[in-house]
């Protein structure tokens, strides 16, 4: 028996927005800190002051100082800018390539679709850190290595999401009508498919930026992301390991920064999904 | 399409993907500028020294022969000799696998037990207090980087409580000590995986609870717990198995980091150390091994999917 699924406006209005509000608030704060850090930080993130090294939070600065006497809070602020810019750039390129391939697969079907999906499978077989190690072996560690490996890692995710959503849209009546009226595959994709899968892609992109920030931190931890003296949350964690007993805040602060940033982006992703597709009901 | 043809098609796709992955690795590591001889000897090396090293490594052969030599070696277990360790790469990988494989299995086991149990508990009574607590914990768990969680575990259980060592691996001669050394890394690696599984299981349980056969089971007079575990959970496991396959890639990436945090002599640490030593032969083979593992696990998940859900066989 077919059941008509309708969303009454009242239920839509009552859909929980906690995720969205919390996500927007945390992510806005993250973006604001990342932008401001390029103009102002409480102290210079690269200025060493051996006399005030390993000072506890509030004894010197909000989050204390590291082994070189650098202000951890200022390093965290500029680290947010580095991490977010890498994650956004990588996800953007991964998204463009992935959505292009996914929508082409859905439009062409047959052999083209099969080949694209197998390419996605092959890329997916390389975890970002393994790609990064391979890329770093060729061009050395750095921002570009991080962006390439995170972007590659995002491609198959967007291929799958956009292909699935595009296939669903293409089977709907208005796409069939457009086909009957003589529109070609390309026009149907640009006029009908892309605008209608934008929501699903945006939701995925938001979550993917969060994931990319975790991966970037991992790359930074291994020294494969931005080189010193540019602060990186991952490298701060790596340096903190040596002083774990003397200065635990060195390890706690960058990890908390990653946790809060990723949590904000994930909540934003969940909130957007609830907004675009209230039936998914991700909110507890 | 018969079930056998479907199995056959998946197997062909598995072999093709493995082949393509090996070609990608070969192209990246062997054909792009900056070949292994130059990288090993450095930019200041004399041209005749580089030429001799190229010949020794077989780099003067045509590309297709180099590829065939490599892949032929993979089939017979001859992966070449590590430039930095001066030992056969196959032995090196086997030795390191004795750490990484148990670590991955322990982490996966912890993640599945914790993730599925909490997911079922949360999904069984959605929007109640337990569900809200579990869902919040899962939301936070997904955002925690596994290597940072590892550092926090060291801070608590090694530096403060002195229950576990902060790192290192004593070897399998003392299995208890070996398992103890892998416990904190496995927990660190399991946390984000468990958090993802909680969310997927919860959502799958909620979906299956609304199915007609569950209503029928209830109408037959079965108790709530029996309906939950025998009918709901069993069917909810289908998407969960798929996610376990997809998450395996993250487990591998996490192992590279967690092994470095805990100074474990595993495959991930080997890949990282080989990068520092510019040992391209090791990187190439470890990358193939990791990619092969991800592809193989996803292939097994595909087969499990066919087996678990009879509807897929006819699809």
Image (cartoon, coloured by chain):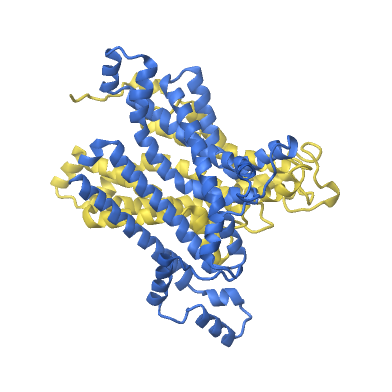
Chain colours: A yellow, B blue
At 78% from the left edge and 36% from the top edge, which residue is drawn?
A58
Say if B20 sits above or below A78 in the image.
below
Q: Furthest residue to the front?
A: B173
Q: Is residue A209 left or right of residue A243?
A: left
Q: Nearer the viewer, residue B272 or B5?
A: B5
At 41% from the left edge and 44% from the top edge, which residue is drawn?
B245
Q: Is residue A94 left or right of residue A6?
A: right
Q: Is residue A123 left or right of residue A2?
A: right
Is the N terminus of chain A in the top left, top right, bottom left or bottom right quadrant?
Answer: top left
Rendered location of residue B304, percent (x, y): 33, 41
Rendered location of residue B64, percent (x, y): 37, 75
Observer able to see residue A195? no
At 29% from the left edge and 53% from the top edge, which residue is drawn?
B11
Q: Nearer the viewer, residue B231 or A202?
A: B231
> Residue B3 occupies which quadrant of the picture?
top left
Q: Nearer the viewer, residue B271 or A276?
A: B271
Q: Furthest residue to the bottom?
A: B48
Rendered location of residue A112, percent (x, y): 25, 57
Say if B95 sits above or below B49 in the image.
above
Observer able to see residue B62? yes
């Amino acid at each position: 028996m077919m059941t008509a699924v309708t969303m009454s406006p009242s239920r839509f209005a009552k859909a929980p927005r906690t995720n969205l509000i919390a996500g927007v608030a945390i992510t806005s704060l993250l973006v604001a800190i990342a932008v401001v850090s390029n103009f102002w930080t409480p102290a210079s993130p690269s200025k060493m002051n051996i006399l005030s090294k390993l000072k506890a939070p509030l004894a010197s600065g909000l989050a204390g100082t590291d082994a070189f006497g650098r202000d951890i809070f200022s390093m965290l602020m500029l680290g947010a800018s580095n991490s977010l810019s890498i994650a956004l750039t990588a996800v953007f390129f991964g998204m463009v390539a992935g959505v292009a391939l996914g929508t082409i697969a859905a439009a062409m079907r047959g052999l083209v679709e099969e080949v694209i999906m197998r390419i996605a499978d092959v890329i997916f077989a390389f975890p970002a850190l393994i790609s990064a190690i391979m890329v770093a072996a060729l061009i050395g560690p750095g921002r570009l290595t991080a962006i390439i490996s995170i972007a590659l890692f995002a491609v198959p995710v967007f291929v799958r999401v956009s292909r699935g959503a595009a296939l669903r849209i293409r089977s709907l009546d208005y796409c069939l009508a457009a086909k009957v009226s003589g529109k070609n595959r390309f026009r149907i994709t640009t006029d009908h498919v892309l605008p209608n899968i934008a929501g699903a892609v945006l939701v995925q992109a938001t979550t993917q930026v969060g994931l990319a920030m975790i991966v970037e931190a991992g790359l930074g931890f291994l020294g494969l992301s931005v080189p010193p003296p540019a602060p990186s949350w991952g490298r701060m964690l790596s340096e903190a390991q040596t002083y774990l007993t003397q200065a635990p805040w060195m390890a706690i602060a960058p990890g908390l920064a990653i946790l809060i940033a990723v949590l904000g982006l994930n909540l934003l992703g969940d909130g957007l999904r609830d907004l675009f597709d209230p039936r998914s009901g991700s909110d507890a | 399409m018969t079930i056998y043809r479907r199995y056959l098609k998946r197997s062909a796709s598995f072999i093709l993907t493995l082949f393509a992955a090996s070609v990608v690795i070969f192209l990246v590591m062997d054909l792009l500028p900056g070949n292994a001889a130059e990288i090993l000897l450095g930019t200041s090396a004399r041209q005749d020294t580089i030429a001799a090293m190229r010949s020794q490594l077989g780099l003067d052969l045509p590309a297709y022969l180099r590829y065939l030599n490599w892949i032929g070696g993979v089939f017979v277990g001859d992966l070449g000799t590590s430039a930095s360790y001066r030992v056969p790469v196959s032995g090196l990988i086997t030795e390191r696998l004795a750490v990484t494989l148990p670590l991955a299995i322990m982490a996966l086991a912890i993640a599945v037990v914790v993730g599925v149990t909490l997911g079922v508990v949360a999904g069984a009574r959605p929007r109640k207090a337990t569900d809200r607590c579990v869902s919040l914990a899962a939301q936070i768990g997904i955002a925690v980087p596994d290597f940072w969680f590892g550092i926090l575990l060291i801070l608590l259980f090694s530096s403060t409580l002195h229950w576990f060592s902060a790192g290192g691996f004593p070897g399998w001669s003392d299995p208890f000590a070996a398992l103890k050394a892998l416990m904190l890394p496995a927990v660190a690696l399991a946390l984000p995986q468990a958090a993802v599984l909680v969310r997927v299981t919860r959502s799958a349980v909620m979906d299956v609870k609304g199915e007609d056969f569950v209503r029928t089971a209830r109408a037959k007079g079965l108790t709530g717990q029996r309906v939950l575990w025998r009918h709901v959970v069993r069917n909810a496991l289908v998407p969960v198995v798929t996610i376990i396959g997809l998450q395996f890639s993250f487990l591998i990436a996490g192992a590279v980091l967690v092994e470095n945090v805990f100074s474990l002599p595993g495959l991930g640490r080997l890949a990282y150390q080989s990068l520092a030593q510019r040992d391209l032969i090791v990187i190439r083979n470890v990358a193939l091994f990791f990619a092969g593992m991800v592809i193989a696990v996803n292939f097994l998940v595909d087969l499990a999917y066919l087996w678990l859900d009879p509807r897929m066989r006819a699809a």
